[in-house]
Image: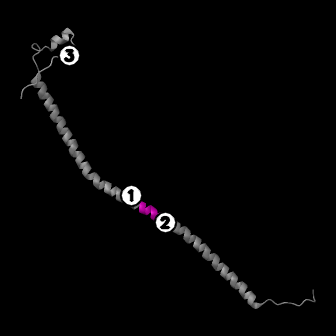
Amino acid sequence: MKNRPHFRPNPYYEDLERMEEAVMSILHNLEMENTEIHENSHKLKKEFTFSRNLLSQLLMENTCRKKLVPLKQESKEVHLDCALNQKYLVDFNKKDKDQQRPDPASSGLRKCKRAGIGHTPVRELPEE
């Protein structure tokens, strides 16, 4: 072995190896940054989609509220009309009962019930 000549490494080769290590380190750092940026981009897309959907929902809710206000007012008016109609009908029924209260002796109603007949006599409507 001592007879072999001794080879010195090429200084350019050593410089190239150091440059390769530096480039590989930079490449690794760039790949890590790229991965991190890609993950952040994906998160931002999700947040953007969520925000856009939230905005759509808020706009829809606002539109529904604007439509609901007149409907609530209309509903109050309808309830008021129903209450007035109900009061009118109650008053009308009281007046009708007061006007149609017949004399029990002149009515054929008692006779029909005593006789066991299942229907009542037809009454005539008052003339207006």
Which of the marked residues, 3 or 1, is nearer the chain's N terminus? Answer: 1
Distance between the alpha carbons at the discs numbered 2 and 1: 18 Å
Q: What stretch is highlighted in magenta?
A: 44-53
The relative height of residue 5 versus residue 69 in the rendered view (above or below) is: below
**Quadrant hosting residue 117:** top left
Q: On residue 14, which mark appears?
A: none
Q: Residues within 10 Å of mark 2 (few under 14, many from 20)?
A: few
| Mark identifier at residue 57 | 1
Crowding at mark 3 (Cα within 10 Å: few <14, some 14-19, many 20+): few
Q: Is residue 9 found left or right of 26 in the rendered image?
A: right
Q: Distance between the residues labelled 3 and 1?
A: 63 Å
Which secondary structure is most common in the magenta stretch? helix
Q: Which residue is rendered at x = 17% and y = 12% of the image?
A: 112
From the image, tell me which residue sits under label 3. 119
Which amino acid lies under the numbered mark 2 shown in the image of this protein?
Answer: Lys
Q: Where is residue 95 in the image (x, y as percent from the top left)?
A: 11, 28
Q: In this view, does 63 lie above or below 96?
A: below
Q: Name the residue under label 2.
A: 45
- Decide which of tag 2 and tag 3 comes sooner along the chain: 2
Q: Nearer the viewer, mark 2 or mark 3?
A: 3
* Quarter in which the N terminus is drawn: bottom right
Circle 3 or circle 1, nearest the eye? 3
Q: What element carries label 3?
A: loop
